[in-house]
Amino acid sequence: MANTSGISASLAGRYATALFELASEKKALPQVEESLAGLAAALAESDDLKALTTDPSVTRDDAKKAVAAVAKKMKLDALTANTLGVLADNRRLSELGAVAAAFQTLAADARGEVTADVTSARALTAAQKKELAAKLKARMGSDVAINEIIDPSILGGLTIKVGSEMIDSSIQTRLNSLATAMKG
């Protein structure tokens, strides 16, 4: 079983932990992980889905109907669809992205992987992810799952966070360092 002590401290972590335990029990971890990854990607790309999860004027009933339709359209597994319904019922849809990230961390931990949060200005190619994962595996000594975050404000380069270790090679940080050095 994954070490859930740090993750389960947050609200999203508690939902993710409960979903992880159910998925483990029902031997549905890969399906739930795939569904949550799809939801996280959809949340990042769809303004409508983002609005659904964050707009306080959306009623519980409307939110439940909407997430049921999303689950059906995206062909999500039953556990993930039920979790969406619970989040909607408890008015916690705004936690969806954090639940997906926490679940990914739990699943990676259960596989003996370390999760690296990799921030880049634009999406990495499959080859870049593979190469980065290999380099991080050599450095960390274990398999590394990459949680990709797109943030155009870093301009270029990468920031990588694995546990408490941070590697920042972003152009934004380099420019900030240069500006500080020029101020004297």
Image: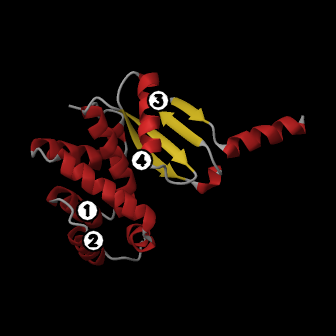
Q: Which residue is mark 3?
A: 135
Q: Which residue is mark 1?
A: 84
CB-based contact (under 8 Å), mark 4 and mark 3: no
Identity of the residue drawn at 41% across and 77% down: 57
> Which of 148 and 63 lies nearest the eye of the viewer?
148
> Which of 145 and 99 lies nearest the eye of the viewer?
145
CB-based contact (under 8 Å), mark 3 and mark 1: no
Q: Which residue is mark 4?
A: 126
120 up-or-down from 131: above or below: below
Q: Secondary structure at mark 1?
A: helix
103 up-or-down from 49: above or below: above
Q: Which residue is mark 2?
A: 70
Tag 4: amino acid: Ala
Of pointers 4 and 3, the one earlier in the residue sequence: 4
Identity of the residue drawn at 58% across and 52% down: 121
CB-based contact (under 8 Å), mark 1 and mark 2: yes
